[in-house]
Amino acid sequence: MKYAVEVAKCGSLNKASEILLIAQPNLSRSIKDLESDLGIAIFERTTRGMFLTPEGEEFINYAKGILDQIEQVEKYYRENSVRKQKFSISVPRACYISEAFAEFSKSLTREPAEVFYKETNSQSTIRNILENNYNLGIIRYAEHYDRYFKDMLEEKDICYELVTEFRYHLLMSNENPLAGKQEISFEDLSGLIEIAHADPYVPSMPLSKVMKEELPDNIDRRIFIYERGSQFDLLSRNPETFMWVSLVPRDIIDRYHLTEKICIDNTKIYKDVLVYRNGYKLSQLDKQFITALCEAKRKNKS
């Protein structure tokens, strides 16, 4: 197409071959091959030069548009994407991970960058890794589901590394009726409103079974949320609410006038696991985020 457009512009094989730095016989052969492939005559060949046929004029208009698009794509990737830093991660709704991401953001240089941070469930995280070009992910699951997840990750050729293990604590307002209680049981929570994230996921298991195991049956009132930020407004403004949480930074607890409590009946162990495609080489930004994540985990565990 590039050859044909240049010949049409010059009206001569000789002139076009000089501009394109290609031997005239080779240029002539390429044009004839193109005409043969298309099944049309693009040029009328005369002693005065090369002239477009009606079909040739139509083809050249299409060819110019296609070549312009190719040039735009090449220009975009040469001038922008090659130098642009890229980072993408899909994670559970966890305060210590959010804190790590905020610290990580300080490490971005003045170079152009595209950063994607998505909070979602484990199923969507795995799908983002496999289908949506996310480089990293963190999935969360109860320890007794370990076999289900590891079998699934190995089947999908996904690498995994343990980030942390923890037991859920209770988070509630300082004005919550249970805020001053030393030992809290499941039974104590029965009259309160639980704030919950509404998307548990375990591979090869029915959602109803997972929900039943994850959520105690004695809670009659629940508010299911998908947007993590609203949970703190709910907890701080409504003293009847509580929430199960992993590691929570001290400044968040103080900022929203909350208190963190241990439930003596909740002994389940949960895992946060870093995942990425097998064969993927961690970038410098990936390593910087993992460093910030380890620091946030260490600080909030102590």
Image (spheres, grey):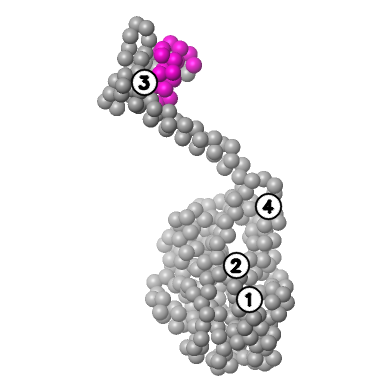
Secondary structure of the magenta portion, mostly? helix
Q: Nearer the viewer, residue 144 or 14?
A: 14
In reply to whether residue 93 is colored magenta, the answer given is no
Task: Identify the residue under disc 1.
Answer: 233
Magenta stretch: residue 18 in it? yes
The answer to whether residue 209 is above or below residue 164 is below
Q: Is residue 42 left or right of residue 92?
A: left
Residue 108 badge: 4
The magenta stretch is: 1-19
- The residue at the point 29 percent across, 20 percent down is 41
Amino acid marked by disc 1? Asp
Judged by depth in the image, the label closer to the viewer, 3 or 1, is 1
| In front of the other: 155 or 189 | 189
Q: Identify which residue is drawn at 69% across, 49% down.
A: 109
Q: Earlier in the sequence, mark 2 or mark 3?
A: 3
- For label 3, count other residues whose C-alpha is less than 10 Å away and answer few (under 14), some (14-19) or many (20+): some
Q: Position of residue 236 (x, y in %)?
A: 65, 80
Q: List the residue tagged with mark 3.
A: 30
* Horizontal and vertical percent position of residue 252: 69, 73
On the rendered image, what quadrant is the N terminus found in?
top left
Q: Nearer the viewer, mark 2 or mark 4?
A: 4
Name the element at disc 2: strand
Earlier residue among tags 1 and 2: 2
Q: Residues within 10 Å of mark 2 (few under 14, many from 20)?
A: some
What whole-number distance in Å separates the C-alpha atoms at marks 3 and 4?
Answer: 49 Å
Instruction: Give residue 117's quadrant in the image.
Output: bottom right
- Mark 1, secondary structure of its residue: helix
Given the image, on which type of amino acid does mark 3 rest?
Ser
Disc on the earlier residue, 4 or 1: 4
